Amino acid sequence: MKQKVILMSLMATLSILYSEDTHTLEKVTVSNGSDGAIFETDNRDNINSQGFTKEAIELYGGSIGMSALKVVGMSPSVDYQPTEAFGSNETSFHDPLRIRGKNQSGPGGVYMLESLPISGNPGGGKTMFDMENISGIDLYKGYAPVDKSLGFSNLIGKVDLTVNRPKKEMETQFAQTVGSDNALRSFLRFDTGQMEDLALFGSVSKTSGDKWKGEGDLDRTNAMLGAVYTPNDNFKTEMFFIHNKDEHHNYYGLSYAEAKDLDTYAKKDWNSASSAGSSNYYDWNKQSFTDTVLAANFEYRFVNDSVVRFKPYYSEDKGTYWFSNDAKTREIEWLIDHDRYGAVLEYEVPLSDELNMKMGYWRGRQQPPGPPSSRRLYTINASGQLQYAGWNILAKNEYHEFNSPFIEFRGDRNKFSYSFGIRYLDFKLAGLKNYTFGTNAMTSSDYDTAIAQGTIDPWGSVDSKTFTEWLPSAYLGYKLTPNTDVYFDYARSYGYDVNLFPTYIASRANFVAKNVTLQQLWDKQKLELSDNFDLGIKYRHNGIVYNPNLFFTTVTGKQANVYDSQYGIAYPSNSIDAMSYGAEFAMSGALSESIDFLASFFYNQYSYTEDFKTMATETSSIKGNQIPDAPTRGVKGSLTYKIENWKFTPIVKYTGSRYGNADHTQEIPSFTTVDFDIDYKLPKIKGFKSADLKLSLVNLFDKRYIASIITPDNALAADTTQPTYLVGAPFSAYLSVGLKF
């Protein structure tokens, strides 16, 4: 009964926001209730970003604590719907994340560590951070400073993680979680404390559990090291190392007919035993990845307060991803082994009391896949066993390369604050040599041997291609009153989808029959560019922050499967225009000494602004239709009630209806989920700095719903490949104990 009263109070607050007059938030901020903000990190940029403090990470990160996307999922216009509490990636090439309707395209990664582009897609690494080791998260949606948007792509925004530095005093932190479906997580961190000029920390964690439906499980092992060396006030060296191994089985994707009848099919999953001719066996639909990241910062501060920073990074992603072909009659083993490395050199100098200049250079290299280069193909024999059948894709890639100088001016004058920057992008898209054509079951299953003995296919091979682009950004804020700021910002972002190569290889015979080489289509490709605009207000009153925000984005070069009349065939082409616009509103703060809250609302539209030919005599009719898997509206909220050593926090999320295709013939209804956390701080225990117990109830009312939809943005009802639908987890419970000593 008490839970229902709390829930009804929260929903009443949210219903006030759910009206046509509301607009947007951007930089929400949460505190302990002292200054009224709910989120605000130490992000000195003070721009149109949203920050999540350590307290917010603990509140919204969930009991398992290894997904930063669960935290930023509380932001307006961020739709993150994992299939289970672990937050692991459901497929290697699909993230259940959309920001303002957009999902990650191509091999770009949304994660940054200390503003360095250490992540990518496809592959592992989605859960390689233990949240205990993260002190803050900054979310950039439309606008981002020139040095906060690096990587293969930044179209949807960036999630920048700040490492929880070594403590100044020696400390040991231990956390243990147990819960539904045999979930078990152990975390241990040790800080050495300040040892003259050096401070260190190291952590290890082990996470395991069963899938909530069907056969299969998850097993993850993580280690992290951090070191900060400060021999004097002018020089600082920081180094961070992460090693993560993640193995887990994937969830079955429902058809649309099954998704409409969750009472019957919600628990449908892969088969528990193999059978002849079918790839529906659970142990053939899984992934295993090992990820290693090394990042550093060498910083020297001069007597005039100017600073030079050198920030090198390296990350390696290696593993396999197993999945079925569309007909589920064959099995594909995707071999992924790639790395990315580079460095950022920055020089920052105060030119005057009102003007600061930052100039820098990013040099980066990134190895495919993205596009895929090595996929083995298997048939399923009469005994229900895998039988090697050659290579589905066999190619040799070069590196994607990035050279990007940038400069930015920022400062404050009277009631104005401003930032103006520009970055030049020189982006070399890797060339590739295709060896797939002519391979069969007699071809060696070893990649290097197959390449050495193979023959280059001139039809499906291409040279590298270079894109160049100027990427401007601007932010202007004005203080109307001591409690009210108005701001406007603009930024251009970029990206590229890599679907052309695998599409050509899959339909090579059709292209050859039309006398079309991949190189001819490759030469036509363009970058996808977005011009992003925001207009918002930040208003503080009686300890509460109100943040409405309007946004508008124009998109050029968005990918779709377009019929090319010159060659008489359809293929993925970055040639279509799109548009995104919407409103966000959030309010957060302290209603009293015992009650903190966050409530938000968003409305957004993201659609193609033109129809395009899909065949010689057929044209799409999707102009103006909302992109698939992108809800147009949503409401989120949390309320924390504190009494003595107790905290009670219901978290409510309403997600509007979505579609599985761009024709809007496959509609998924809206849904609301409720989580409930109970946190108890134990009385002072001798020898311990603190001790906490936390009970987390996820999907409290056991709502059945579709979490995410695996589908391209231009999916059509007539396509051979149809969307698949992943079911959200049912009610689950987790109990955690945390100790510091």
Image (spheres, rainbow, N blue to C red):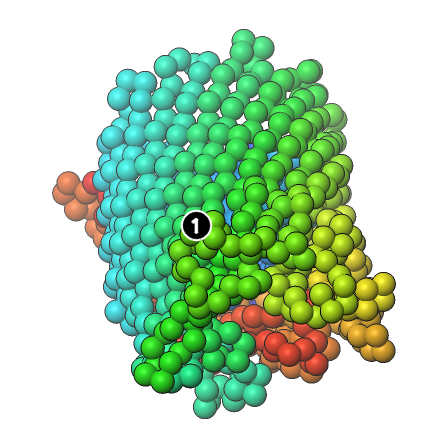
**Which picture quadrant has residue 473?**
top right
Q: Is mark 1 on a helix, strand or loop?
A: helix
Asked whether residue 577 is in view, the answer is: yes
* Residue at image point 46% right, 87% down: 265
In the drawing, does residue 194 fall left or right of residue 18? left
In the displayed structure, 352 sits above or below 81; it is above
Please state the horizontal and vertical placement of residue 99, each as a whole percent of the image. Answer: 62, 57
**Which picture quadrant has residue 619?**
bottom right
Q: Which of 640 and 564 is in front in this view?
A: 564
* Residue at image point 49% right, 16% down: 300
In the drawing, does residue 402 fall left or right of residue 479? left
* Residue at image point 33% right, 52% down: 245
Asked whether residue 85 is in view, the answer is: no
In the displayed structure, 350 sits above or below 395; it is above
**Which picture quadrant has residue 729?**
bottom left
The N terminus appears in which quarter of the rendering? Answer: bottom left
Please state the horizontal and vertical placement of residue 381, each as a whole percent of the image. Answer: 38, 81
In the displayed structure, 733 sits above or below 427; it is below
In the drawing, does residue 360 fall left or right of residue 293? right
The C terminus appears in which quarter of the rendering? Answer: top left
Q: Which of 664 and 189 is in front in this view?
A: 664
Please state the horizontal and vertical placement of residue 506, each as a whole percent of the image. Answer: 61, 67
Q: Nearer the viewer, residue 616 or 282?
A: 616
* Residue at image point 68% right, 29% down: 406
In the drawing, does residue 520 fall left or right of residue 464? right
Q: Residue furthest left?
A: 686
Q: Mark 1 points at which residue?
A: 448
The disc labelled 1 sits on which kind of residue? Asp
